Structure formats: structure tokens, C-alpha cells
């Protein structure tokens, strides 16, 4: 996992320093693939994010915080509206609790989940954007429908 995060950070640093048509920014919302708060970047049609994902356990409601990263292919430049396909991992993507005979919740399981999503980014001329996406996540413990809604600001060189 540490090597994966290192690769994504290096990718985002590359995006920020390249002379190609690129953008880097920050976004927030609720997105299984990109997290609640994320750094985003794009060079040409390729993009990436690294973020945090704060959610809760399904039974008790206890807070869980995970890390997530993604790599995406966008059909538009960083400053244009368009569709995208992303794949990545969310370290808190799968969450499960067990309650025996209606008692207290226990046997917590929090596992990383691979996620693939398809979405649309609506970009304004000022750099502000809105994103919506849906997809599918999978891991050894189960599979799930995933979704995301976020807003952000992107600036480029």
C-alpha cells in the first residue's frame, strides 16, 4: 500500500511540474473512488487523485477514515467538461459489522476495495467544476455499487 501511495504522489508531482497542458487542484464531496477531500491532477487526457475517505460503519455508525487513490482517463483537457473513466483503491471501501441477537455491534471488518467508475465533469471557465460518477467495487469479502458527487477547483500552467 505504501508503494502504491508513493507512485500516486510521484504522479501528482509530475503533473504539477510538467510543461505539457496540465492542471492541478483540490476537490471535496462524497466519492468512493476519490474520497471526501482529494488532490487532483491531469496531464493531457490522464489524471490522478489521492485523498481521504471518511465514512461510518454500517451498524454502529462508528467513524472510519481511509485513504484512496485513482488514475483516470478523461476525454477532455483539464480545463474542459467531459466524461472520464477511473480505477483505483479505497482502503475503507468494504465495511462490515455483526450483531448477535440484536446485541452490541462487533467483529468489525474494514478492507481495501478496488473500484472502477465512469463519470462526467462539468467545468466552468473560472476553474470550478462539478463531478458525478457511478461504478462498481470489489474485494475478497464482497462487491458493491459505488458512486460519487464532488466539487472542486482546478488551475493550470
Image (spheres, helix red, strand yellow):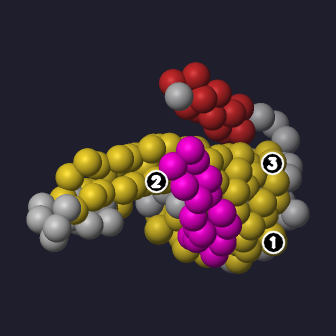
Residue 41 lies, in percent from the top left, at 67, 48
Q: Which residue is mark 1?
A: 82
Q: Residues within 10 Å of mark 3 (few under 14, many from 20)?
A: many
Rendered view: 57 above or below 119: above
SS class, disc 2: strand
Quadrant of the rendered image containing residue 14: top right
Q: Identify which residue is drawn at 16% across, 70% down.
A: 102
Tell me whether the residue at label 2 lies in contact with that at label 3, contact meaning CB atoms closer than 8 angstroms.
no
Q: Is residue 12 left or right of residue 60?
A: right
Which residues are drawn in magenta? Answer: 131-148
Q: Identify which residue is drawn at 38% across, 47% down.
A: 110
Q: Give the residue at the far left of this rendering.
A: 103
- Distance between the Cα atoms at labels 1 and 2? 29 Å
Q: Earlier in the sequence, mark 2 or mark 3?
A: 3
- Distance between the Cα atoms at labels 2 and 3? 27 Å
Q: Identify which residue is drawn at 44% across, 60% down.
A: 36
SS class, disc 1: strand
Q: Identify which residue is drawn at 87% across, 63% down.
A: 75
Q: Which residue is mark 2?
A: 94
Mark whose residue sits in front, 1 or 2: 2
SS class, disc 3: strand
Magenta span dominant secondary structure:
strand
Residue 85 lies, in percent from the top left, at 78, 60
Mark whose residue sits in front, 2 or 3: 2
User: Is there any visible trace of residue 106 in the rendered image?
Assistant: yes
Q: Residues within 10 Å of mark 2 (few under 14, many from 20)?
A: many
Rendered view: 44 above or below 29: above
Q: Which residue is mark 3?
A: 46
- Distance between the Cα atoms at labels 1 and 3? 13 Å
Q: Earlier in the sequence, mark 1 or mark 3?
A: 3
Residue 11 lies, in percent from the top left, at 69, 33
Amino acid at each position: 500500500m505504501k508503494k502504491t501511495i508513493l507512485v500516486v504522489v510521484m504522479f501528482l508531482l509530475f503533473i504539477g511540474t510538467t510543461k505539457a497542458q496540465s492542471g492541478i487542484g483540490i476537490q471535496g464531496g462524497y466519492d468512493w473512488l476519490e474520497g471526501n477531500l482529494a488532490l487532483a491532477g491531469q496531464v493531457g487526457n490522464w489524471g490522478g487523485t489521492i485523498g481521504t475517505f471518511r465514512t461510518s460503519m454500517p451498524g454502529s455508525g462508528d467513524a472510519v477514515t481511509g485513504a484512496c487513490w485513482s488514475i483516470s482517463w478523461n476525454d477532455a483537457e483539464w480545463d474542459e467538461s467531459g466524461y472520464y473513466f477511473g480505477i483505483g483503491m479505497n482502503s475503507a471501501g468494504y465495511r462490515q459489522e455483526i450483531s448477535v441477537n440484536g446485541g452490541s455491534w462487533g467483529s468489525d471488518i474494514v478492507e481495501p476495495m478496488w473500484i472502477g467508475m465512469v463519470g462526467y465533469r462539468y467545468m466552468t471557465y473560472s476553474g470550478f467544476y462539478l463531478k458525478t460518477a457511478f461504478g462498481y467495487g470489489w474485494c475478497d469479502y464482497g462487491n458493491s455499487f459505488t458512486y460519487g458527487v464532488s466539487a472542486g477547483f482546478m488551475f493550470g500552467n
